């Protein structure tokens, strides 16, 4: 073992746990059917983050929605339709 040649203090420092790293399960865009099954609170929390990160055009393309369909989703959730990188017409 590498720790066999270390002093006591060095062994303790070597065996200490590192920093805790957490990941969000929904950091990346999920398919629309998965999104549709989520709770309202998750919709309102995740969609604005994805819009800022990915843009409306990318989300529409990935979900297979038209611009009008995406606007309907935004209106249903009470989100503004002009708050992202790209514009939907």
Image (cartoon, rainbow, N blue to C red):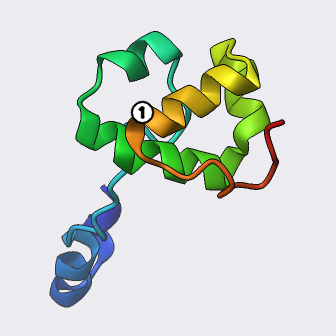
Question: Which residue is rendered at x = 17% and y = 79% of the image?
Answer: 12
Q: Is residue 79 left or right of residue 1?
A: right
Q: Quadrant of residue 58?
A: top right
Question: Which residue is rendered at x = 64% and y = 55% of the image?
Answer: 52
Q: Residue 61 placed where, x, y %?
A: 76, 21
Does 74 appear above or below 10?
above
Q: Is residue 45 left or right of residue 54?
A: left
Closer to us: 8 or 62: 62
10 Å neighbourhood of mark 1: few (<14), some, or many (≥20)? few
Q: Is residue 61 visible?
A: yes
Q: Quadrant of residue 13?
A: bottom left
Q: Residue 23 placed where, x, y %?
A: 37, 49
**Residue assigned mark 1:** 76
Does 85 appear above or below 28?
below
Q: Is residue 73 left or right of residue 35?
A: right
Question: Which residue is rendered at x = 63% and y = 20% of the image?
Answer: 69
Closer to us: 4 or 25: 25
Quadrant of the image containing the C terminus: top right
Q: Residue 70 placed where, x, y %?
A: 62, 28
Does 45 appear above or below 16?
above
Closer to us: 68 or 37: 68
Q: Residue 85 placed where, x, y %?
A: 77, 55
């Amino acid at each position: 073992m590498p720790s066999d040649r270390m002093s006591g203090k060095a062994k303790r420092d070597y065996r200490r746990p590192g920093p805790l790293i957490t990941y969000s399960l929904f950091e990346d865009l999920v398919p629309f059917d998965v999104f549709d099954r989520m709770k309202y609170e998750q919709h309102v929390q995740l969609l604005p983050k994805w819009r800022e990160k990915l843009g409306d055009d990318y989300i529409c393309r990935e979900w297979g929605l038209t611009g009008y369909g995406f606007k309907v989703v935004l209106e249903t959730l009470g989100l503004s339709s002009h708050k992202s990188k790209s514009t939907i017409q």
